[in-house]
Image (cartoon, rainbow, N blue to C red):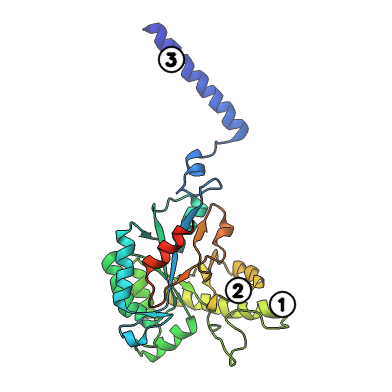
Amino acid sequence: MKGNFRFAALLAITAGVVWGVWYAEFGAPPDIRAAVSPTGGGDMAEPIDIPVLMYHSINSRESRTGDYVITPKAFRKDLEWLRDAGYQTVVVQDLLNYVEEGVPLPEKPVMITFDDGYYNNYLNAFPILKEMGMKAVISIIVSETDKYSELQEDRENYSHLTWEQIREMMDSGLIEFQNHSYGLHKNGKQAARKGIGKKPGESTEAYQQAIREDVEKGQARFVEMTGYAPIAFTYPFGTVSEDSYPVLEELGFRATLDAQGKLFRLTGDPACLRRIPRYNRPWGKTAQQIIEKATKKK
């Protein structure tokens, strides 16, 4: 027994010496578990295909429904199907935590997003999300929130969220807010540009200065009114210019949301968070139909 003990002790000492030499020469070895885990991020992580749903207005009147408006009943059915199918909601911060720190995601992640920041998101969608314990991302047009915070006019059909409502939703721990521009969510003949798209003949310098002023103003208002600076920018109308990338990165955005209508492939590369694609959820087509069709194409 003494011989065995001496041998084991000698083996342990030898291993310790080898480890010490390795550490001194090369530093600590990489965390292999984080590098190869399919849900733990890192450069060697298996890609994860995530459905990202895009909603806008949730209106109780079926007569108001359309490409960007559905009823609370339809929204509830979407969430019930997601729950029953085993999906769990994530927000942008969860994606960043996965990519940057290797924090695991649920086995079947899904992201629910809302664009524009309508008051009816608070009135009709928020109670259902709270009831079901599901998270969502809301990207607001900051100038509209400033406007309706002053007007204090809560109309289901057209009003936008107030800062007070936003703070309440943030405090729930379920709703993450992002920047959808301060006042560039405009289109049509009266608009100087479509969203943050580039005008014909506009120089790169002039373009970047214009969007910097607008988006930075939105960030400043967020910080002033909530103490929080959004980490993602959501492109109005899905209009994208590559010249916007350096400006948004300069302003601290670590992700952008688009509307390309395909599955989002999450990898360990931070570049994958640029232009996260989403599926619009119109009236007449359920989340189940959208996701089942998308995942069958894989």
* Coordinates of residue 11 in the picture (x, y in percent): 48, 16
Q: Determine whether 145 is above or below 233 in the image.
A: below
How crowded pointer 3 is (Cα within 10 Å; few <14, some 14-19, many 20+) is rated as few
* Coordinates of residue 192 in the picture (x, y in percent): 62, 88
Circle 2: residue type: Val
* Coordinates of residue 220 in the picture (x, y in percent): 52, 76
Which of these two is toward me, 44 or 51? 51
The residue that disc 2 covers is 240
Q: Determine whether 92 is above or below 223 in the image.
A: above
**Tag 2 and tag 1, C-beta contact below 8 Å:** no
Residue at disc 1, secondary structure = helix
Could you tell me how far apart the alpha carbons at marks 3 and 1 are, in whole angstroms? 70 Å
How crowded pointer 1 is (Cα within 10 Å; few <14, some 14-19, many 20+) is rated as few
Circle 1: residue type: Glu
Could you tell me how far apart the alpha carbons at marks 2 and 1 are, in whole angstroms? 16 Å
Residue at disc 3, secondary structure = helix
In primary-sequence order, the first of circles 3 and 1 is: 3
The residue that disc 1 covers is 205
196 lies left or right of 288: right
* Coordinates of residue 255 in the picture (x, y in percent): 54, 65
